[in-house]
Amino acid sequence: MVLKIHGHAVAPLVRLVAEVCKEKEIPYEVVNVAVYKGEHKTPAFKQFHPFGQVPYIDDDGFILYEARAICRYLVKKYEGQGTPGLVPSDPRSEALFEQAASIEYSNFYPFALGLATEKIIKKHRNLPADEARVNEYLENLNAKLDAYDDILGKRAYLSGDSVTLADLFHLPYAAIVIEELGYNVLESRPNVARWWQAISTRPAWLAVKVSA
């Protein structure tokens, strides 16, 4: 049975899961969820994702939600095909990967998500952005990216010399910040700029960048 990704095809984390499917050469089908009509908040949807968020997957009856957990699962299940090493198996390399994944979740995602919420999601809801919060998110993000530039001055990717899920986890929201919202966070950070160029031009991402 083809893997089913339940969500909206343009939703950032749906596209992240689709990107990993492309990396691992996994056929998939997006089952549309009408998020702008609130379908993800209905009791029927919450039977599969109790928090009412997208995506979740149905892998031949195995239901899994939370995008980063889904990506880890797919990489391990399909270890023998597609892009290798997205989750390293060596204990030290895996520890460095988990460290990098934690960096993304703690030091990048909250601020990028905050910017997306204020500048995009609120616009869809006909609400004004809170510019004070926008400035706070951007100030925090810039401080975190200074540390990223130090890290990436010592290695090609966040956990070493090879790309891992920790790098790919950044794709959807970094694209929003850098490309859609146009915040100039790269010019003064050559190592971040080089890293972003490397991950954002991957064929798997280009295939799902607009829609899964």
Image: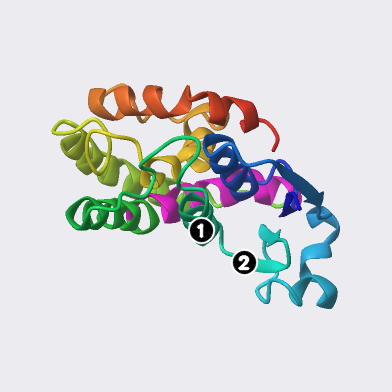
**What residue lies at 26% left-to-right and 45% top-to-bottom?**
143
Neighbour tally class for label 1: few under 14, some 14-19, many 20 plus, Cα within 10 Å: some
Task: Give the left or right position of residue 172, taking residue 142 as reference.
Answer: right
Compared to residue 193, the image places residue 129 above or below, namely: below
Secondary structure under tag 1 reads helix
76 on left or right of 161: right
Tally the numbered discs: 2
Badge 2 vs badge 1, beta-carbon distance below 8 Å: yes
Residue type marked 2: Leu
The x and y percentages for residue 169 are 45, 46
Instruction: Name the residue at 31% across, 41% down.
Output: 142
| Residue 174, x across and y down, in percent | 46, 37
Relative to the observer, which residue lies in front, 195 or 133?
195
Amino acid identity at mark 1: Tyr
| Residue under numbered circle 1 | 73
**3D distance between C-alphas at marks 2 and 1:** 9 Å
Query: Was residue 18 drawn as part of the magenta stretch in this picture?
Result: no
Q: Give the number of the disc on residue 64.
A: 2
Q: Position of residue 83 (x, y in %)?
A: 45, 35
Residue segment shown in magenta: 107-126
Q: Residue at x 67, y 51 (%)?
A: 122
Q: Residues within 10 Å of mark 2 (few under 14, many from 20)?
A: some
User: Where residue 49 sits in the image (x, y, percent)?
Assistant: 69, 71
Q: Circle 2 — which element?
A: strand
